[in-house]
Image (spheres, coloured by chain):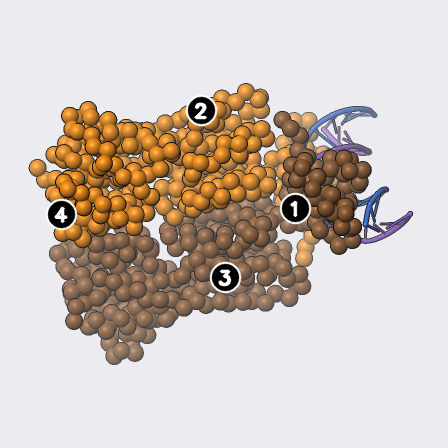
Chain colours: A orange, B brown, C blue, D purple
Amino acid sequence: MSKKITIYDIAKKLNLTAATVSRALNNNLKISENTRKLVQETAVEMDYEQNTLARALKSGKSYNVGVIVPRIDSNFFASIIRGIEEELYPKGYHVIICQTHDQEDLETGNINSLLNAQVDGILMSISNAKTKNNIFSNLSQKHIPLIFFDRKKDIDGVSSVTIDDYSGAYEATKHLINQGCKRIAHLSNDRLLEIYKNRYLGYKQAIIDNGLEFDESLVIETRSKVEEGKKTMKILLDMETRPDAVFSSSDFTALGAIQEIKNNGLRIPDDIAVAGFSNEPFTRFMELSITSVDQSPIEMGRIAAQVFLEEVGNDNKIKTKKEVVLTPELIIRKSSRKRI
Amino acid sequence: MSKKITIYDIAKKLNLTAATVSRALNNNLKISENTRKLVQETAVEMDYEQNTLARALKSGKSYNVGVIVPRIDSNFFASIIRGIEEELYPKGYHVIICQTHDQEDLETGNINSLLNAQVDGILMSISNAKTKNNIFSNLSQKHIPLIFFDRKKDIDGVSSVTIDDYSGAYEATKHLINQGCKRIAHLSNDRLLEIYKNRYLGYKQAIIDNGLEFDESLVIETRSKVEEGKKTMKILLDMETRPDAVFSSSDFTALGAIQEIKNNGLRIPDDIAVAGFSNEPFTRFMELSITSVDQSPIEMGRIAAQVFLEEVGNDNKIKTKKEVVLTPELIIRKSSRKRI
DNA sequence: TTGTAAGCGTTATCAG
DNA sequence: CTGATAACGCTTACAA
């Protein structure tokens, strides 16, 4: 029932004007120490709470930022979001999370609806390589900062935070080679997305650098799902000479591959060694723990948020494109460690 | 650069007044079909987009709802959120997600900051049983719908959507008994929270109903983490006569328990059978798949959202407390299926 | 059916 | 240092 207290209420009580109260609450310079204290005290006393909507309308800032990810039920994205929150909450921002579920229409739809909700910025991981660039230029026209993390696109003036997927893949593949593997397959994914292209390139270069023969037929594009991993592994096992190792661009497909390998009575890592990517918690939990590449997602989220804060605080129109690249870490586990 | 188009711009262009434009856009009844069409057409033509902040300030509705969960990186909560989104997005609502990470101060902090962000309602799963009720009565005073899902508290006028934890636990325990287990331990959790109390009670009743001896020392309270499951299982294994089954109130502690059991050279399910709760995806992925209780989280989220929509549309002050209880489903897997 | 005008709660500009 | 006033963009009585 109790009507919301406004600055007018507290102005009336103190025989002041709303403007003064506003200034006092915002720690404006031109205000006497006395009234400042007085106002702030009676504000808490009266249970005053600022109407953020009104402030937003006036200032044009909503103190909401949008975060768009393919899905939140993977530890990787959930951790990134946690990093973003840790950085943004103390600054008074709220985070609106949207999922695309890898559907293209949801991607543009989410952006539009976030714009409609007047967010101050958008942090996102691209789902679909085919998303039209004009939706992004739309953002920059409106001076709304856009920051990519993990899955980015190369767009003028748009900053990004990624890991060095190339070197992560290179190290993982080199590790498999060091374990004595000679015929290493690669479960890839849509290579129009930079992360998958770079993982592919890192894998390929490691093969070449170590004097192995690069065989394109061992590279198969699939989607980051357990079931897809199974299907793809089936194809590989049906080849005339099957691979003796699999480097997967996703932990989920790596898991599917492992299941399929076991179903065929082959041993891991002895017959086929496996390595994944992302260091999802389940890779550590499995009885047969899975080698993977850690991407320090919390750090990634924090940095993305910091970049946003820089850009939103930067009133001049000169946009600088900042590209932060983190270093991945290979975590070696049972699925690839041969007891040589 | 391009200034935002407002209803004034389109009014000027059409030699109308802003009020008429507003009415036309809102499909107000008292407007001629002609002008309605004309306005709507020029609106799209001019790329008009409603300023939701202004509407919110005027109407007192932000079309944002807050969702508070312990964490988002569990499939259970992520799925609930997905269900909520599916129901709310089509109605024009946005979802602001907050995590408590099971910290009490974050729970009240999140509520306050959502209130500050002027959300139209809050859907939440309680983290901490000790959270003071006055923060909730605060909400109802402001006529902001509050809906609990999964972890609820019994508060006048506050609706909730839960599953029948009692029967889920009862069925799981009965299943273990049917497998021939006689000494069934229970990994519990903070029983001030209804879900854990009910899982405990269901477990206990199943024991009693089936003529087994109920032994309180086999019930240990712990926290929903893999590491905690390991620790707790260690205690159970150190008992004079160790249990021959474990019913865990969480999949994560069940997983920890399984690891510890294996580390001690015991076989699952032969020496000790294990069942968890929540049907997290990893329970299915494991080589030794884990028996668990499914809670149909997407459905839970959808219903919670529907209840919110009902309450927010319900202008009269009479609050009706709605309590929806879903039926859980026991999923039997290797960790408890003895080949009798 | 349309126009006029007030108001949602703030903040910014201009005086004083 | 403080007050008066306008403005942010929209909705809605009340008038016409």
Give the Cα distance between marks 3 and 1: 25 Å
Q: Residues within 10 Å of mark 3 (few under 14, many from 20)?
A: many
Asked where in the image residue B195 lies, by quadrant, the reply is bottom left
Q: On the image, numbered disc 1 is attached to which residue? A: B56
**Front tag of 4 and 2:** 4
State whether residue B209 is above or below residue B163.
below
Residue corresponding to mark 4: A267
Instruction: List the residue tagged with mark 3.
Output: B303
**B236 over C8 or under it: above or below:** below
Name the chain under label 4: A
Kindly identify which chain the residue marked by label 3 belongs to: B
Neighbours of disc 1 within 10 Å: few (<14), some (14-19), many (20+): some
Residue at disc 1, secondary structure: helix
> Are the two marked residues, 4 and 2, in contact with CB atoms closer than 8 angstroms?
no
Badge 4 or badge 2: first in the primary sequence: 4
- Mark 2 lies on residue: A322
- Give me the residue at 68% from left, 55% from top: A2
Callouts 2 and 3 in the same chain: no
Q: For marks 3 and 1, give the one nearer the viewer.
A: 3
Verify CB contact (< 8 Å) between mark 2 and mark 3.
no
Q: CA distance from mark 2 to mark 1?
A: 35 Å
Report x, y in % for residue B33: 76, 50
Q: Residue at x 72, y 46 (%)?
A: B37
Q: Position of residue B270 (x, y in %)?
A: 16, 65
Q: Mark 3 touching mark 4, by CB under 8 A?
A: no
Q: The residue marked by circle 1 belongs to what chain?
A: B
Q: Where residue B123 sits: x, y (%)?
A: 51, 55
